[in-house]
Image: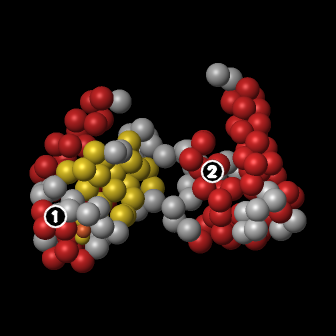
Amino acid sequence: MSTAIAEAASNAAVRQIIEARRAMSGALLPILHDIQHALGHIPADAVPMVAEALNLSRAEVHGVISYYHHFREQPAGRHVVQICRAEACQARGADALVAHAKSALDCDFHHTSADGAVTLEPVYCLGHCAVGPNIAIDDALFARVSPQRFDMLVAGKRGEQ
Ligand code: FES
């Protein structure tokens, strides 16, 4: 799809989401969630559209997007790796795993490796606290993840593309 066509499709999706939600009270967060769900991130073009529809300034909309780390302003990588940062996983070595992951991917949380393969995100409990440190890659959960296992899992995902 050409860039212009992709942008037009993306703007049409944003317009549709705004129309479906604008009348509800507290519409800003639901609209932003729906946009991210539909497009994988919140494109820069969506900010003025949302601001105008809700009678807010662009700065207000942008402020909310940057306040919540959940919202992405850039598309995610091909895979999203979430590392549990909650207490039980920390007690089982998650800090060392996080340090390893950041160094192996050469990026911080909320960023994507230079090859576009992996976006690294923190998560606060994946519900399997007794078998940490835990990570999720896309929708799959992995327990007892050592730095070596992390590298194997990520290499496997990179191989899948
Ligand atoms: S603390 Fe990590 S899964 Fe619950």
Pick the quarter of the image with the N terminus.
top right
Residue, disc 1: 132
Q: Position of residue 142 (x, y in %)?
A: 20, 51
> Where's residue 106, x and y in %?
34, 54
Identify which amino acid the numbered label 2 is placed on.
Answer: Asp
Determine whether 157 is above or below 120 in the image. Answer: above
Q: Residue at x 34, y 69 (%)?
A: 124
Q: Is residue 73 visible?
A: no
Q: Residue under label 2, please give it.
A: 34
SS assignment at label 2: helix
Q: Nearer the viewer, residue 44 or 105?
A: 44
Q: What amino acid type should be assigned to the residue bearing mark 1?
A: Gly
Mark 2 lies within 8 Å of ligand 1 (Cβ measured):
no
- Tell me: residue 30, above or below residue 139: below
Q: How is the image coloured?
A: secondary structure
Q: Earlier in the sequence, mark 2 or mark 1?
A: 2
At 42% from the left edge and 38% from the top edge, which residue is drawn?
78
Find numbered disc 1 in the image and state the secondary structure of the residue it sits on. loop
* Label 1 Cα neighbours within 10 Å, binned few <14 / some 14-19 / many ≥20: many
Q: Quadrant of residue 138?
A: top left
Ligand 1 closer than 8 Å to label 1 CB: yes
Ligand 1 falls in quadrant: bottom left
Judge depth for marks 2 and 1 and give the one in front: 2
